[in-house]
Amino acid sequence: MKLLRVGTAGSERPALLDTEGTLRDLSGVVPDIDGPLLADDAALGRIRAAAESGELPALDAAGLRVGPPLARIGKVVCIGLNYHDHARETGAEPPAEPVIFFKAADTVVGPHDTVLVPRGSVKTDWEVELAVVIGRTARYLPSHEEALAHVAGYAVAHDVSEREFQIERGGTWDKGKNCETFNPLGPWLVTADEVPDPQNLALRLWVNGELKQDGTTGEQIFPVAEVVRYVSQFMTLYPGDVINTGTPAGVALGQPEPKPYLRAGDVVELEIEGLGRQRQVFGAA
């Protein structure tokens, strides 16, 4: 299933994109798309049955904002330097273990919302990423099979980053990762049954129409199953938590000088095979 949330920010309602590409209203079936829903097999079953019945009301998508596909996110766990080609382009050694940092849940915005270049920023960068959405409480998972069994679905994430704040201002990466609007998510939460192999997905990103990133999740140093298993050794993952799994080569940081960092007015488009497409116009904070 392709689950999403539509409407003005803060007042989104649950919806479903059916197999014909028609947007369907789910508000009569479930109150929202969130962690408790993803952990509730009965509720998911009701959605499937309603979708198959063909009786869900159609929504007019024209002019309708698409919000983040998941409400009340608990935490956003991020994996750094998780693609062989990205490590090479930045001159970094591939990590021996996954690099973990966090984004605050309030950085998450809709896939087409305006992204704000922070005040004083000269190194705002782009990163297309596969997001993993957790569907069952996960702690100390013993195997890759168990890890994938705890995944509810997948989505497109844009891990927008300010490299000066991240690298040159001391402390941890978090300063360059947590600026407002820095995590567009969606358009859809695609349930795991529709993604049989998360290591075989194409990722692409364009800036002002120019292709910048063109990679595949097959380049991941630590595949999705290992990322989920590994993270569960250090923290409990709850339904509705999100893991951003890293970005392939092609970010501004890896380009020759002068590096083409983002400015207000730039347009970024990104997509992952089968998971949908985002488009953001960047503005000034």
Image: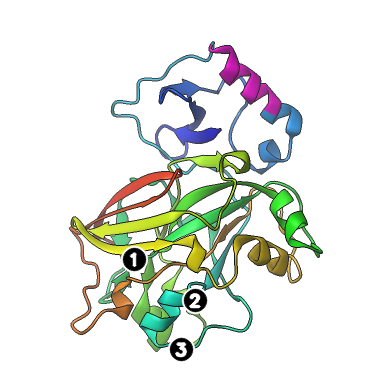
- Mark 1 or mark 3: which is in front? 1
Q: Which residues are magenta?
A: 45-54
Which callout, 3 or 2, points to the residue nearer the camera?
A: 2
Residue 98 within the segment the image draws in magenta: no
The residue that mark 3 highlights is 170
Does label 1 or label 3 sit earlier along the sequence? 1
Task: Give the Cα separation between the discs numbered 3 and 2.
Answer: 19 Å
Q: Amino acid at mark 3?
A: Gly
Determine which residue is flagged by label 1.
Answer: 126
Few, some or many residues within 10 Å of mark 2 (<14, 14–19, 20+)? many
Q: In the rendering, at what x and y percent does residue 119 appear?
A: 28, 70
With 15 as the anchor, is 285 left or right in this view? left
Residue occupying image coordinates x 51% and y 55%: 200
* Res 81 label: 2
Q: Give the number of the disc on residue 17.
A: none
Q: Residues within 10 Å of mark 3 (few under 14, many from 20)?
A: few
Q: Tag 2's secondary structure? A: loop
User: Mark 1 or 2 closer to N-term?
Assistant: 2
Give the mark nearest the N terminus, 3 or 2: 2
Res 221 seen here: yes
Q: Where is the C terminus found, in terms of image quarters?
A: bottom left
Amino acid beneath label 2: Leu
